[in-house]
Amino acid sequence: MRQERIPLSKKELKRYKVISQWIEGYITGKQAAELLSLSLRQVYRLKKRVLEEDENGVIHKNRGRKPAHALSEDIRQKILNLRQSETYRHCNDVHFSELLAKQEGIRVSPSTVRRIRCQANIPPKRKRRPAKVHRPRDRKPQTGMLVQIDGSFHRWLEDRAEPMALLAAIDDATGKILAAVFRRQEDTEGYFLLIRQMIEQYGIPMSIYSDRHMIFCSPNEKRSIEQELAGETMPLSQFGRALKDLGITHIKAMTPQAKGRIERLFQTLQDRWIVELRLRGIQTQEKANQVLPELIKEHNEKFAVAPLEPENAFVPLEPGQDPGFDSLFSRSTDRRTRRNHLLPRKNVHPRRPKFQSNHSVQNAGASTKTLDGKLFVWYKGKPYALKEATRNKASTSPEKKKESS
């Protein structure tokens, strides 16, 4: 019975020609083994199969067979349906394969997911652009030597809530997320909460790397030549003042590429956390902040690396130590009290200081607002709490009402 002829690949065709020359006596078995880069034992096997099956003898026996571990058509279709569903539509291939194992109990590799997606003509989540070449900067050798901070304003909850800002701090040596908080927008109080969260858990870092947002840089930070010659100190923003009091060196990046580690972090988080928040049914900023510790832990377990040196550059807080966060992370304004002890505030009713003595406190110093909303005024180096002042509304007499009418 004549065997069905199967097309040969280039590799198989070469093997058939060399073995045929050996059979016909033009070359020896040793020469055939050298030409095919095979052992002498293997070329003898090929010769035997060619004598029995002709061309089909050089074809691999698994040709045309379905692998034993191949996905069934039902599983392949289920993966495709899930990939096109509303729940997983924004996942990249790697994240989708992880969620399939975690949520659906289907364990497949990212390459399998990509192959199924390509066969269905589904475009990738993000097109790859040619990489721009930037001079690389080595990681710091110790954890805590440099912390990068930034914010990303994005639709983290998609259409379930308004866009909000994710503020994050990442360790340069390990790529570990040290702290994160969701806010309505990037603001000074949000970064105060971020730094406080990091210090309470890890300690005080050596330096912090940020962009040149007005939160980090005072608008009057640039001095004229005359001011520099006169030795005038450079004014600091509220955030810069807090870092100076903590002894943290503040480094301001000139370009986004300079702090590329945290820029890439936000790309990863936008890929993953939007889907994770959707799967958890999060619909408010408050609930999103509650699940942040769990999301941070999962991220660090997957992406954080070991530092080059085991020493820790963070300065931890001593047990029972009061770091004075209320005064450190507060906003100060230079508003003076009036003769009647009232402190004028924009769009807010005046407030009256609770002074312990009855002496005059005219022109009491700068007012301070803490993270929990408490207000203080400073007088002779001491803080005094403020309370809301009641203001009586002017009553209008009946005669004046008639005159006005």
Image (tube, rainbow, N blue to C red):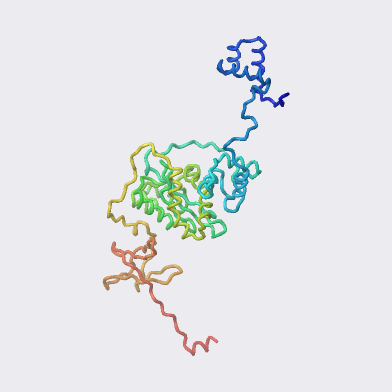
Q: Residue at x 60, y 53 (%)?
A: 86
Using the rendered view, name the quadrant where residue 359 is placed.
bottom left
Q: Can residue 303 be seen in this snapshot?
A: yes
Residue 365 image point, x, y percent: 34, 64
The residue closer to the viewer here, 237 or 123, is 123
Q: Nearer the viewer, residue 335 or 248?
A: 248
Q: Is residue 284 left or right of residue 342?
A: right
Q: Give the left or right position of residue 79, taking residue 246 as reference.
A: right
Q: Residue at image x 38%, y 72%?
A: 388
Above or below: residue 397 compared with residue 32: below
Question: Going by the picture, which residue comes out furthest to the front?
Answer: 1
Q: Position of residue 61 (x, y in %)?
A: 62, 27
Query: Residue furthest toward the right?
Result: 2
**Image quadrant occupied by the N terminus:** top right
Figure quadrant of residue 112? top right
Q: Position of residue 236 (x, y in %)?
A: 40, 53
